[in-house]
Amino acid sequence: MQNEPAIPLDIPWYRTPFFGRLILLVCPPLGWWLVLRDPFRTRGQKVLVTLFTLLWLVVYTALLIGLAMLLGVADLEFKGGFGPTLVRARTRPNYGWLDESRREQTAAPAPAGTNLWRKLPPYWTDFRGPGRAGRYAEQPLLTEWPPEGPPRLWRQPCGGGYASFVVAEGLAFTLEQRWEKEIVVAYDLETGREVWTHGYDALFSEWMGGDGPRATPVYHAGLLFTLGATGELRCLSAARGSVLWRKNVLLDTGAQNLRWGLAASPVIVDNAVVVVGGDGTQNQMVVAYDQLNGRRLWTALSDTPTYASPLRAELAGRSQLVLVTASRVLGLDCGSREVLWDTPWKVPYNASCAPPVLVGTNRVFVSAGYGVGGVLVEVAPSGLRASARTVWQNRNLKTKFNPAVFWGDHLYGLDEGVLACVDARTGERLWREGRYGYGQLLLAEGHLIVLGGEGQLALVEATPAGFREKARVEALRGKTWNVPALAHGRLLLRNAVEMTCFDLRSQPAEAATH
């Protein structure tokens, strides 16, 4: 057995074993440095000291972060990636700022011309716009932005949550969390002024996602349908905000809420408003209510639901709802409540958030993060039902919260926070560039309007030739996962703190006379 090196008797005091142990306890990094310089330490001792120092650094860092959070100078926030991020402050509603802003609005006279847009036909009345496609084609828009960005019409505080806007009758509707109430709000599109509110007691609170509702309202024939995170389904008059009927979907079906709350936006099917409910029920994952009186019309499926909003589409000659469940993607015939086709689909933590995207006339693209990627499914008639064939499946486009948009045989989306273009025919990724975080995007005028995860707004050409960002400006402050809305040339953006509106019309003066 090899003996340890002898320690000279005349070593200085600062190199004695006692002093070394003391330094290791008080300041391991310095002790680690002294040990490594000490030729009289064995290699095994140095390895143990190194491991101890690394452990100490982890504990010390955690203690520093905890102290900073306790003192209110730092916090942790989940922004969509793996694990939380250290931030100065989490993105939360500023209720003091919100209350002051609304008091000022109430005290001030209403601006002239606030009814300008009420004469225009409704356009952006559903989650992600017409057909839930995330594409805008109502009128020409600016495709060259000045350095300061497009004209900003207004900016003001709002409540929490992840709902987007729908626009009709000159009003922009959304669903917010204010204190311990979910609030349905109608804003004047022209000025941002609050026209009416309807609130009720409901608070869904969860650390990763934060407080508030997740689902976007839907407008149809003068009615507004909203679904809160705790299952409150309400039908209101869009013009006045009065309640016509209400149901709690979870109580009505005896279901349990999902881990991150109900998030799928309601969808209109004939005379019904259809919602994705909670977990733990038999044949009640999907529930349809009569639009006019709230009477339950039918239920379907015993699958475990996800957070992805359903898509109404015509596939294989059949009108159907395309739904993403915890185990499969399927097409549901709303008349017979029969599953026409399905294909396996599994995401860790049951965290399917991005809704399905219609590709062409007979294909559906579904994607998720967490290393899953996407699949393109082709649906074809097959006797009385339909068949589903996987065209391709890979990890070239992993959209987590944000659905992709389909344009010109290509899919564009945020692949784990980085903008990417994929050939929809083959699944080949053509480019991946431009880090925007876990934000959202829309397509208009051959361009992508990208709302980044930190509130940055960018204009990018939608071309398979390569990444071409034409403009980028600051739009909102804080974490931003809410989907943009675009109606009558007005771009509406919000997060859990504030909301804003940009004028993207190419000819504002002329458009205002219509």
Image (cartoon, rainbow, N blue to C red):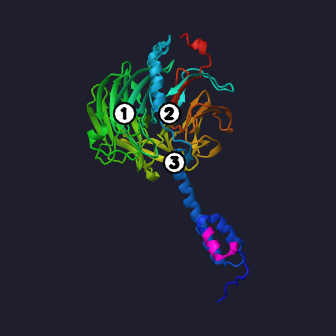
Extreme bottom residue here?
1
For the point 27% across and 43% down, which residue is it?
A: 254
Please tell me whether residue 20 belongs to the stretch shown in magenta.
Answer: yes
Quadrant in the picture for residue 59? bottom right
**The N terminus lies in quadrant:** bottom right
Residue 58 visible in the picture = yes
Q: Main secondary structure of the magenta part?
A: helix
In the rendered view, would you say 415 is above or below 298? Answer: below
Residue type (three-letter) at the residue carrying disc 1: Lys
Coordinates of residue 485 in the picture (x, y in percent)? 51, 28
Which SS class for mark 1? strand
User: In terms of sequence position, does the residue under pointer 2 or pointer 3 come before the other?
Assistant: 3
The residue segment tinted magenta is: 13-23
User: In terms of sequence position, does the residue under pointer 3 or pointer 1 come before the other?
Assistant: 3
Query: Which numbered marker is on residue 181?
Result: 1
Circle 3 sits on which residue? 69
In the rendered view, would you say 465 is above or below 125? Answer: below
Circle 2 sits on which residue? 497
